[in-house]
Amino acid sequence: MITIAKTVDEVRSIVKGWRKEGLSVGLVPTMGFLHEGHKSLIDAAVRDNDRVVVSVFVNPTQFAPNEDFESYPRDLNKDAELCEKAGAAVIFHPEPSEMYHEDYSTFVDMRTLTQVLCGKTRPIHFSGVCTVVSKLFHIVAPDRAYFGQKDAQQLAVIRHMVEDLNFDIEIVGCPIVREADGLAKSSRNTYLNEEERKQAVILSQALKEGLSLIQQGERDADKVKNVVRSRIGTAPLARIDYVEMVDFKTFENVKEIKGEILTAVAVYIGKTRLIDNFIWKG
Ligand code: PAF
């Protein structure tokens, strides 16, 4: 049976034991309700490291009061099964009070990258993410940590934080894993009813159309964004939060498509907010 560590002391002492044996350690930070996307991160971590810790923690500080912290799906037994099968050694599953004691007051805030895209709609989100990920990095002290490219802004923010704060940890980004029809895998897909699930495919279809325009030589970002927007608009249940094209280093909006460009969308399908993206390098 996979070990489930619930306290900081417990996971630290396990990792210390591994370090004494000279073993390398990979960390896969998650909020649980694991799917194939998470499994691909765990697979990569198992491939690269002697031991792998998967953290399963629905982090309250990255949710605003009006968001889905309470209803976020949870299933530790199923998560443990997936982690064990994939070859992870330990799940770190703390209670919120273990991570944030009563008078907790230290947060990691980034002044660039976090005010745009998802940070515009979710102003406290990246502060919560950077704070919890820093804490996980201090607690587990891994050699490598694994994040999915579906959350491309999160991946860029974490890379930047690691550089700014001198964490001696390699950040490994892993490709988006998709359902057969193209919908990016996400724990939030479980919120969708049958009709919403059908229409949710519009995100990946619209992005595909945008990418194909770029591949055909289009370099005007507004033209590509308009095509993506109109395609999303064909799904009656879709409401666009944003469709943006930004420089993948600075996260500044681009007019002309050149260099490394992130095209990212956030779309409500019914009440569920979904994100997807592609990165193009020219
Ligand atoms: O991507 C997620 O699931 C979360 O934002 C993370 C990185 C585990 C931090 O809570």
Image: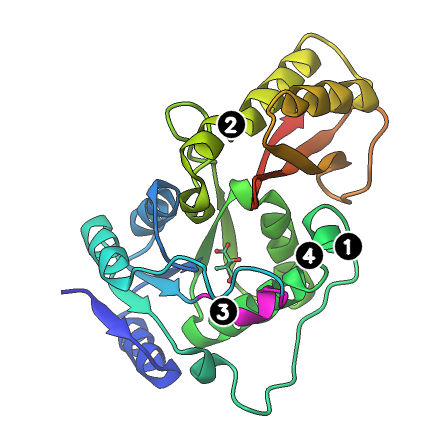
Q: Earlier in the sequence, mark 4 or mark 1?
A: 1
Residue 221 to residue 160: above or below:
above
Residue at the left extreme, as displayed: 1
**Residue 247 shows which numbered tag?**
none
Q: Is mark 1 within 8 Å of ligand 1?
A: no
- Asked if marks 4 and 1 touch (Cβ < 8 Å), the reply is no
Whether label 4 lies within 8 Å of ligand 1 gets the answer no
Q: How many marks?
A: 4
Decide if residue 166 is in sight here: no
- The location of residue 101, given as percent across then percent down, is 52, 88
Q: Which residue is mark 4?
A: 122
| Residue topped by disc 3 | 137
Residue carrying label 2: 199
Magenta run includes residue 39: no
Provide the secondary structure element on which disc 1 rests. Answer: loop
Q: Are marks 4 and 2 in contact (CB under 8 Å)?
A: no
Q: Give the CA distance from mark 3 to mark 2.
A: 38 Å
Looking at the picture, how far across and down is residue 94, in whole percent?
38, 76
Give the mark nearest the N terminus, 3 or 2: 3
Under mark 2, the amino acid is Gln
Answer left or right for 238 relative to 46: right
> Which residues are drawn in magenta?
58-65
